[in-house]
Image (cartoon, rainbow, N blue to C red):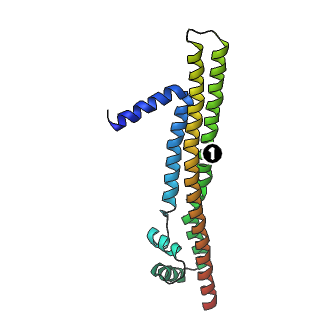
């Protein structure tokens, strides 16, 4: 059996035991992955103005003013009617997408363990319901099925939530560092313009 076949077989087994909440968690995992890829892309400045995306990344890594992108940005701003406003607009274009995506990503990530907890409660209801009623199945089968559902959904919620929270927090720290460096650059440029006026 191929690797993909084994993965699909295991997913089918987990899905049959975890119920619809397991599949909801799988769908949520894909949505979180999509959001994290969007955040990663936004940190690459796809909406860059004044400079190219690559130049902004290089400039914000070293905002000291000794690089080619710094001199090019300086030249671009010198011909602008209002350099401060032009620089502020560039900053909004660079960072607005990530600023809007981070809260959405963190809400989705924090919902994964909560959906897992809902699966725990659902599995416990199934377990206690199986203990209280007479069914054609043996009580141990009903009880073990409920416990399996409770454990699978809890584990899946934590496996999705914890690593993605760490990744999103790392991306957030990178974003905040870029914003701080942009403000340092903005301050240096505006100070240079005011002294030359």
Work out whether 122 lies above or below 185. Answer: above
Figure quadrant of the N terminus: top left
User: On the rendered structure, is 63 left or right of 134?
Assistant: left
Residue occupying image coordinates x 50% and y 47%: 33
Residue occupying image coordinates x 58% and y 39%: 157
Work out whether 156 lies above or below 194. Answer: above
User: On the rendered structure, is 46 left or right of 142?
Assistant: left
Figure quadrant of the C terminus: bottom right
The residue pinned by badge 1 equals: 110
**Of 99 and 24, the residue lying toward us:** 24
How many numbered marks appear? 1
User: On the rendered structure, is 99 left or right of 51?
Assistant: right
**Of 113 and 96, the residue lying toward us:** 113
Residue 141: percent from the left, percent from the top? 55, 17
Residue 14: percent from the left, percent from the top? 49, 30
Q: Specify few, some or many for label 1: CA neighbours under 10 Å numbering under 14, 14-19, or 20 or more.
A: some
Q: Quadrant of residue 193?
A: bottom right
Q: Confirm whether residue 123 shows in the render.
A: yes
Residue 30: percent from the left, percent from the top? 49, 43
Q: Confirm whether residue 82 shows in the render.
A: no
**Of 158 and 189, the residue lying toward us:** 158
Q: Secondary structure at mark 1?
A: helix
Residue 138: percent from the left, percent from the top? 56, 12
User: On the rendered structure, is 49 left or right of 172?
Assistant: left
**Of 30 and 167, the residue lying toward us:** 167
- As drawn, the residue found furthest toward the left would be 1
Q: Quadrant of residue 121?
A: top right
Q: Quadrant of residue 68?
A: bottom left
Residue occupying image coordinates x 63% and y 79%: 187
């Amino acid at each position: 059996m191929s690797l993909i076949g084994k993965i699909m077989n295991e997913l089918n087994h987990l899905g049959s035991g975890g119920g619809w909440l397991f599949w909801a968690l799988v769908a949520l995992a894909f949505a979180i992955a999509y959001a994290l890829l969007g955040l990663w892309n936004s940190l690459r400045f796809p909406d860059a103005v004044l400079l190219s995306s690559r130049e902004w990344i290089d400039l914000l890594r070293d905002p000291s003013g000794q690089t080619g992108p710094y001199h090019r940005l300086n030249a671009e701003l010198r011909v602008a009617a209002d350099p401060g406003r032009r620089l502020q607009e560039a900053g909004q274009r660079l960072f607005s997408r990530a600023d809007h995506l981070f809260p959405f990503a963190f809400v989705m990530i924090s919902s994964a363990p909560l959906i897992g907890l809902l699966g725990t409660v659902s599995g416990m209801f199934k377990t206690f319901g199986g203990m209280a009623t007479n069914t054609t199945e043996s009580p141990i089968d009903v009880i073990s099925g409920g416990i399996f559902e409770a454990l699978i959904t809890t584990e899946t919620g934590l496996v999705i939530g914890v690593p993605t929270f760490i990744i999103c927090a790392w991306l957030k720290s990178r974003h905040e560092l870029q914003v701080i460096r942009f403000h340092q650059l903005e301050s240096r440029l505006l100070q240079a313009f005011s002294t030359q006026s």
